[in-house]
Amino acid sequence: MDVRFSAGRALLLVRAPLLDFGNEFRHTDVVKSVGLRKNDGRPGRPAGAASSAASVPVGAEGPTRAAIVQLLLEEGPITATAIGTRLGLAPAGVRRHLDALIDSGQARAARSAPWQQKGRGRPAKQYQLTATGRGKLGHAYDDLAGAAIRQLGEIGGEQAITEFARKRARTIVAGIDAIGEHTPEKTEAKAEEIAEACTEAGFAATTRKVGAGVQICQHHCPVAHVAEEFPQLCEAELEVFRELLGTHVQRLATIANGDCACTTHVPLMVMPTPKTSPSSVAQPATVRTNDSGRSAE
């Protein structure tokens, strides 16, 4: 997160989404004075894959509120105590900002699940952004993007939309090689690499170890409103994840469906497909019949 001050206003920089129709159609978020960043110079990454930033006015609340919102976006659900620890703020001050966000409909709170609770006592509240809160972080040009994709479908049909979605997904992860050897360490590292690329494209992605797998969590979807109408965007993204990770990955939740994050589960070990021997295949039972066609006793 980057906080800048301009004309008496604090501005929070968040990454804008990557929605690319070649070099003609780009989603540069709502602030026109901030364009796409130049190519980051990473080998194999075309200029179209470079991340972009947009300045989102924080307003009178100041950079503290912006920092709290950023944590809710990237790490929610999260407790007020954890926010205070990360930002060096007093719990009372954190809760004041959280209460204001809840009152405005931008955040919500829920009690921690038993497995999330540390120690005894009443479960702590976990805070996260609502759809309204995420919407304030940049869904500009959604109407334009939706109209453009609809027009693309009218001209080229569903296949044209699917191809566009695949091209967009591959552009996001351009420069990332498919995994070679499947080990837990290499699979987790590849998932981290994918998450970093998604973050550069505006998805605020992280990874977390869960059981025998790792989850790629995209806490913000800059094209969520468009993906509600065109699920091909989500499907193509998942397809690219599978190609890079070389294993079956499972999408557990999506922001487009109303969840708080897009969560993809990646198993750390690739299980071999069991080979079925001819003797193990179930055979139909042989029934002897008598001359009348009824089964013989």
Image (spheres, rainbow, N blue to C red):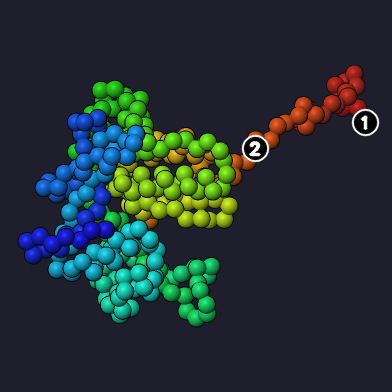
Residues packed near mark 1 inside 10 Å, few (<14), some (14 to 19) or many (20 plus): few
Q: Is residue 255 visible?
A: no
Badge nearest the viewer, 2 or 1:
2
What x and y, as percent, mark residue 235?
41, 37
Residues packed near mark 2 inside 10 Å, few (<14), some (14 to 19) or many (20 plus): few
12 with respect to 68 (left or right): left
How far apart marks 2 and 1 lie (CA) works out to: 44 Å
Question: Quadrant location of residue 239?
Answer: top left
Q: Judge by depth and name the residue closer to the eye, 156 or 205.
A: 205
What x and y, as percent, mark residue 147?
21, 35
What x and y, as percent, mark residue 281?
75, 30
Residue, disc 2:
272
* Of pointers 2 and 1, the one earlier in the residue sequence: 2
Position of the C terminus, as image quadrant, is: top right
Residue, disc 1:
297
Label 2 residue SS: loop
